[in-house]
């Protein structure tokens, strides 16, 4: 396997300082590397109306799409705590929209890398854009 791009961790780590997480006090950040080699980062943005909270992955994906890119090759996610900060279910589906089954999802904490999964490992048998490719009646 190709070695992990150190820029992915560095950029995800710098984004952690932008987290707005006064309610959970659980900052999360991430950095996407696209198929074309560009980087897009994001951090979670919470809201007093809790259900409006945005996950770090959603912010980074919005950032990427806004810049005209739509293909996630790898993503590095940083959170704290003993448990691995793997993406929540909704974010696995958000990543799926722009990534193939073999896209790499790296998980770390502020000290560095802890684990890597493929998207297919985290979201097997996923529903995605391919399901909607057939013509409708
Ligand atoms: N969070 C993320 O940013 N990404 C995830 O995949 C899991 C959870 C954030 C949402 C909320 O601001 C905080 O972590 C606690 O759930």
Image (cartoon, helix red, strand yellow):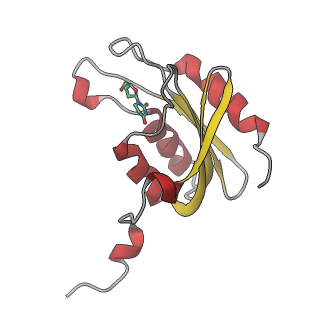
- Say which residue appears at 63% left-offset and 31% top-offset: 12
Instruction: Give the image location of residue 111, x and y in percent.
Output: 67, 20
Q: Is residue 40 left or right of residue 82?
A: right
Q: Locate the N terminus by quadrant.
A: bottom right
Ligand 1 falls in which quarter? top left
Q: Locate the C terminus by quadrant.
A: bottom left
- Say which residue appears at 24% left-offset and 23% top-offset: 50
Instruction: Give the image location of residue 84, x and y in percent.
Output: 51, 31
Instruction: Give the image location of residue 120, x and y in percent.
Output: 50, 59
| Count of all numbered marks drawn on residues in the image | 0
Instruction: Give the image location of residue 54, x and y in percent.
Output: 37, 32
Q: Is residue 40 above or below residue 28?
A: below
Residue 109, by quadrant, is top right
- Say which residue appears at 80% left-offset and 47% top-offset: 3
Residue 130, by quadrant, is bottom left
Instruction: Give whichever of 4, 68 is nearer the camera.
Output: 4
Q: Is residue 10 left or right of residue 115?
A: right
- Say which residue appears at 76% left-offset and 36% top-offset: 7
């Amino acid at each position: 396997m190709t070695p992990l791009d150190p820029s992915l961790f560095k950029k995800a780590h710098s984004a952690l300082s932008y987290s707005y997480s006064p309610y959970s006090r659980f900052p999360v950040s991430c950095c996407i590397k696209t198929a074309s080699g560009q980087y897009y980062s994001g951090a979670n943005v919470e809201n007093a109306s809790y259900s409006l909270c945005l996950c770090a992955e959603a912010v980074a994906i919005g950032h990427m799409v806004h810049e005209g890119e739509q293909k996630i090759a790898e993503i590095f996610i940083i959170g704290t705590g003993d448990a691995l900060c793997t993406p929540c279910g909704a974010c696995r589906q958000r990543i799926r929209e722009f990534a193939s089954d073999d896209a790499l999802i790296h998980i770390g904490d502020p000290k560095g890398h802890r684990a890597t999964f493929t998207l297919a490992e985290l979201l097997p048998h996923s529903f995605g854009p391919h399901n909607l490719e057939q013509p409708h009646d």
